[in-house]
Amino acid sequence: MKVQDIVDQLGLKICSGAAGLNREIVGGYTSDLLSDVMGNANENQIWLTLQTHKNIMAIASLKDLAAIILVKGYQPEEDTAAQSNEEGIPILSSEEETFELTGKIYDLIKRTK
Amino acid sequence: MEFRFEIEGGNFSKAGTASSEVKKILKQLNVDPKIIKRTVVSLYEAEVNVVAHAYEGEMNVEIIPDKVSVTIQDKGPGIPDIDQAMQEGYSTATPKVREMGFGAGMGLPNIKKNSDQLNISSKVNVGTIVEIVNYLK
Ligand SMILES: Nc1ncnc2c1ncn2[C@@H]1O[C@H](COP(=O)(O)OP(=O)(O)O)[C@@H](O)[C@H]1O
Ligand SMILES: [Mg+2]
């Protein structure tokens, strides 16, 4: 499953990094604690968080994550979006709450396995 | 091969840049991706600790055929009790830093898990030296 597939099926907004919409997704990780993501997320996962500052891009890049989804309508800060464009790692945004969105993405990924 | 990177205390917008440079170098050297991943986690956490807890610092990287040795050294408040600091969940991070998602007290435990050798020495009101070694084979 590609990032684009999740965007289409869940009607997500593309905030930045559209060049990476063809990145492959193998799983997901939901957390707002940066060290938790650093220590436990895996490459090619999609990361759900409410953090919007630039460090989320540093982590996504260092961990080779597929994309970031901001929950509850949050938008990336300007420098966060800029780095996302540079690296081609998409930042997406959803109006939904973390719980609902995580459940839907879990379902989508499970179905395609 | 040796490399040196500056780390600015308090500047979160630059946190991770030194670790990112090291990642690029290790990739270019065709180091095993598993070892790159472990090294990146431990270097990032050590770098963020300088940004979050110290005033200024540097990361010195030495890569020889069988290992990557990294020293992260800072001028800062130091760590009065290293055993306590190593405990999962222990953090003296400010509320502002915690709001950003840092300060979970998982950094040093992450370093421990993702390094083959870890040595921390610190002097209160002087600074901290974190030495990380990962074997490449
Ligand atoms: N370079 C450093 N200088 C001063 N104190 C540090 C440094 N690194 C770690 N510490 C101390 O150790 C604690 C635990 O560090 P860590 O496990 O990385 O958690 P966190 O950074 O989330 O607080 C910090 O809260 C701080 O008190
Ligand atoms: Mg830390």
Image (tube, coloured by chain):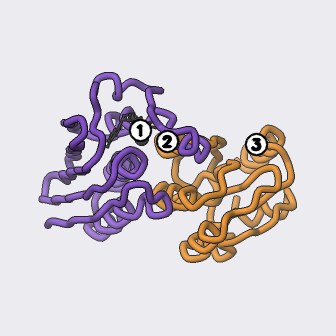
Chain colours: A orange, B purple
Q: Is residue B137 visible?
A: no
Q: Is residue B60 left or right of residue B101?
A: left
Q: Is residue A90 visible?
A: yes
Q: Tell me which amino acid carries mark 1.
A: Gly
Q: Ligand 2 is found in which quarter of the picture?
A: top left
Say if disc 1 is inside 8 Å of ligand 1.
Answer: yes
x, y percent for residue A70: 73, 54
Quadrant location, the N terminus of chain B:
bottom left
Element at label 2: helix
Q: Is residue A19 left or right of residue B50?
A: right
- The answer to whether dots 1 and 3 both sit on one chain is no
The residue marked by circle 2 belongs to what chain? Answer: A
Could you say which disc has been placed on residue B107 in the image?
1
Q: Tell me which amino acid carries mark 3.
A: Thr
* Residue at image coords 20%, 47%: B135
Q: How many numbered callouts?
A: 3
Q: Counting other residues with Cα less than 10 Å from the Cα at mark 1, is it few (<14), some (14-19), or many (20 or more)? A: many
Tell whether label 1 touches label 2 (CB within 8 Å). Answer: yes
- Farthest residue to the front: give it: B125
Say if disc 2 is inside 8 Å of ligand 1.
Answer: yes
| Tag 3 residue | A102
